[in-house]
Amino acid sequence: MSRFLVASDKFKGTFDAGEVVGAVAAGLRDGGAAAVEMPVADGGEGTAAALLSSLGGEWLTAATEDALSRPVEGRVALLADGRTAVIEVAEASGMWRLRPGEMDAVAASSRGTGMLIVAAAEAGADRVIVAPGGSATTDGGAGMLEVVEASGCEAEVTVACDVDIPWERAAEVFGPQKGASPAQVTELNRRLDALAAAAPRDPRGVPRTGCGGGISGALWAHLDAKLVSGADLVLDAIGFDRALERCDGVVTGEGRLDAQTAGGKAVAAVAGRSAASGRPCHALVGTCDLAESGWQSLGLTTVREATDLAALRQAGRDLAIGSASSPAD
């Protein structure tokens, strides 16, 4: 019997990683294969849940603000060691909190993220992992820094980066999806340049400083934060490599497989580790925008589109049946 490690990220805006993994695993079992379920993340939404599920701990709730400064409640994951907290920028400052007509890339503030960092420190955390993906902001972390610096928070910060984009490209790459017009992208670029020039360390040209509209760069420049691959941080923490050793193949996935996948996304990290171990890695995605040569260069063996949970389950079943004709030794 073939044994698959199902290590998928979320399908953003549609299914969380647990739902995707559960559907694929059910299909694999339908087809006679064994399946190990391992939801993954890369510094975007779902990062806190993945770490909490593997390492243990609890969710805390804190008063905060959304990107338009409206009061909301946000969650902080306090891990079982009692000293490490995981904060997703999207919890407070995320696009998901705004209706389509409310998107305002210029006015959006990261203050709410700062409030969650302070709440984590007040709960006893002296190490904070910040997952910057999914933000609605391009304020260079200015709102967040104002809150954190006023609090006197001295927690050690690690940013689990989901992309490699440097500070100076944050507006052009992510501004449009946050509602910015071409003229506003130019305005945001000017604002980011001014913030970089005034920072203790200039984040321009430094990989990963553009995450979360500059939140990662602000934490690096002002609080000496470490910028690491969010995908690798999660995979190491949840024991991906140990699980991989006991499996014959891997199934991964995300909502859209595209040019950004190679720049720090979970699928690329999973595929790379699978290829290095000699295991085939199959991707199930909502949409594939890469040519075959593009996804093969990531280390993927096959790619198949599946847009709902029923299709994901069927794809898992097909993979299991296909593997049964040539089982691993």
Image: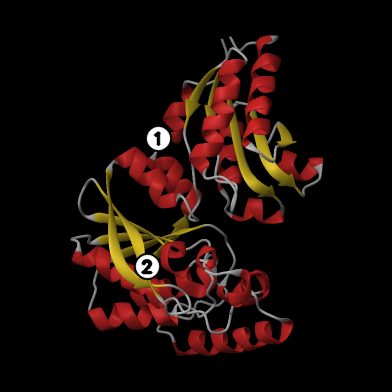
Local secondary structure at mark 2: loop
Q: Residue at x 52, y 74 (%)?
A: 137
**Residue neighbourhood size for the residue with mark 2, other residues' Cα within 10 Å, grouped as few (<14), some (14–19), many (≥20):** many
Give the left or right position of residue 93, taking residue 270 as reference: left
Observer-nearest of 249 and 105: 105
**Residue neighbourhood size for the residue with mark 1, other residues' Cα within 10 Å, grouped as few (<14), some (14–19), many (≥20):** few
Above-or-below relation of 255 to 280: below
Would residue 133 be seen by someone viewing this image from the given angle? yes
Q: Residue at x 52, y 31 (%)?
A: 22
* Amino acid type, mark 2: Ala
The residue where tag 1 is placed is: 239
Picture quadrant of residue 220: bottom left
| Quadrant of the drawing holding the N terminus | top right
Would residue 209 be seen by someone viewing this image from the given angle? no
**Mark drawn on residue 225:** 2
Q: Position of residue 152 (x, y in %)?
A: 22, 78
